[in-house]
Image (tube, rainbow, N blue to C red):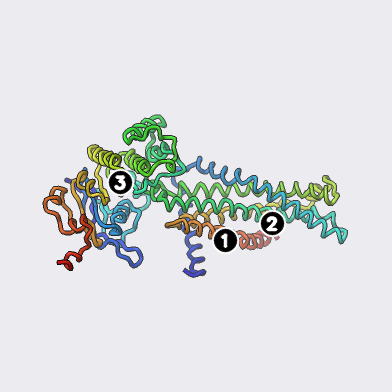
Amino acid sequence: MNGMTQIIHFFGGVALLLRDIILELRKKPFYFHLFLQQVYEMGWKSLPIIFVTSACTGMVLTLQFGLTLEKFGGKIYSPKILSLAIFREIGPVFTSLILAGRVGAGITAEIGTMRVAQQIDALLALGTSPIKRIVIPRFLGGIVALPLLCLFSCFISILFGALVGYWELNLDLFYFFYQIFDTSKLHDFFSGYIKTYFFACFITLTACYFGLKVSHGAYEVGNATTKTIVFSSVLIVLGDYLLTKFYWMMVM
Amino acid sequence: MKSIIEVKNLYISFKEKKVLKGVTFSLSEGECLALIGGSGDGKSTLLRSIIGLESPTSGQILFDGKNILRFDVEQYIFIRKQISYVFQGGALFDSMTVYDNLAFPLREHTDWSEEKIKKAVLHELKEFELEGSENIYPTELSGGMQKRVGVARAIIIKPKVILYDEPTSGLDPYTKKNMQKAIIKMQKRGATSMIVTHDMQTALKVCDRVALLKGGKIQAVDTPKNFRENPNIFLNNFIKGIKQGENDESA
């Protein structure tokens, strides 16, 4: 299958998967405990990596903005730029990319291995829908967990950015936070935050699609995992541009 | 006796390869049918198509007189509550303990209390000599034990029909004997069984009829007694491991 055919297959397959999810969501039962388990797996267990990456991002951005603007006497503007960059772009996109690697790859590997071990067939044979039991909890779990992780990431980035501003750039902490609240309006925050719902859909749908497509062998599981990371990362960055453009068209 | 499953002129192809080329047979209520044949002849494919895990190219599969190939997802779920499938490797859910694997069909398809489910699970574990393994995960079990858990999970819901895919392969003689006993016991409970196997001993000992699948078609169906007394040429060759045609050349 060449590249273009593969892309067309991917979008068609994901659309059919989304249709199945919507159809199955209307039927009973809803596995609430599995949904909570996924929120825990995707959200709670991702906190350490999101904490480290967000803290480092906040610190390095403050340092870069501060040191660059210092040459022009504009060091005091670094909190403004930092907050806009974090809320609008870095927070949502960075968190989503990390989740695509950690969670998306995990979902594909898990579902792919279940396919190889005939566990998906066993679910079907036992009269249980794999979409209901496997896909929907992960899909909804991602939609709940990713926006919460984005909030956490933005908070940590700003906090550690402020600490670096205080230690390295000699900016007053009160001044730093005052500048952030003065600059960032609610729509700045929402322009980034809303995107995480779309990114969560991209990651979970891509991961489930490639996982369910595995038919045999460890090689195919590895291949599917790689495809999940590549496709969901591209969807996130491409979707980021389109969603940003759409959002500002609506707001302006 | 009334037919519970009827397969009529079933064709299945995978891309260019034709696996089943017009399979026709029927399974009566309470009967046990063994399906034997060479590796790659489509025995498991036929079994999987009965439960909707494969999509036939053409033909009919009737369950209680209704063509299940025309069923939608909801109707298939209803059928799958009545037809259980024993997978060759067990296909146990490795994220669940043995107890949860056995309790799974009951939790999904009954409104039983946890107390009642526990009683049923512990009873089946005892039946299959798996006591004490309820809190173990499937990956920690031996192949034979996994197989027994797979059978126990399939029969716990007391289905009308049980489809066994190689239930005795890879088992030691003692476990194999126990598995044969379990199959006979299920028959006595009134379940209809279909067994795909290479194990002639099990096929002839446990089943009421034996069918030979070769070249994508059912070549012979007869009782074990008749197969023993008047061995069919295909069956003889199968047992002896001689390919069709080799006989003629050597003669």
**For mark 1, what is the residue?**
A230
Would you call the spot at circle 1 few (<14 residues within 10 Å), some (14-19), or many (20 or more)?
some
**In the image, what residue type sits under mark 1?**
Val
Report the chain holding disc 2: A
Quarter of the figure that contains the C terminus of chain B? bottom left
Numbered tag placed on residue B167 in the rendering: 3
Q: Residue at x 41, y 36 (%)?
A: B99
Report the chain holding disc 1: A
Q: Nearer the viewer, mark 2 or mark 1?
A: 1
Quarter of the figure that contains the N terminus of chain B? top left
Q: Find residue B231 and report its image quarter.
A: bottom left
C-alpha span from label 3 to label 1:
41 Å
Report the chain holding disc 3: B
**In the image, what residue type sits under mark 3?**
Pro
Mark closest to the chain's N terminus, 2 or 1: 2
B1 vs A69: above or below = above
Q: Of helix, strand and loop, which one carries label 1?
A: helix
Q: Of helix, strand and loop, which one carries label 3?
A: loop
- Nearer to the camera, B204 or A247: B204
**For mark 2, what is the residue?**
A89
Left or right of A137 on screen, residue B31: left
Q: Residue at x 47, y 43 (%)?
A: B95
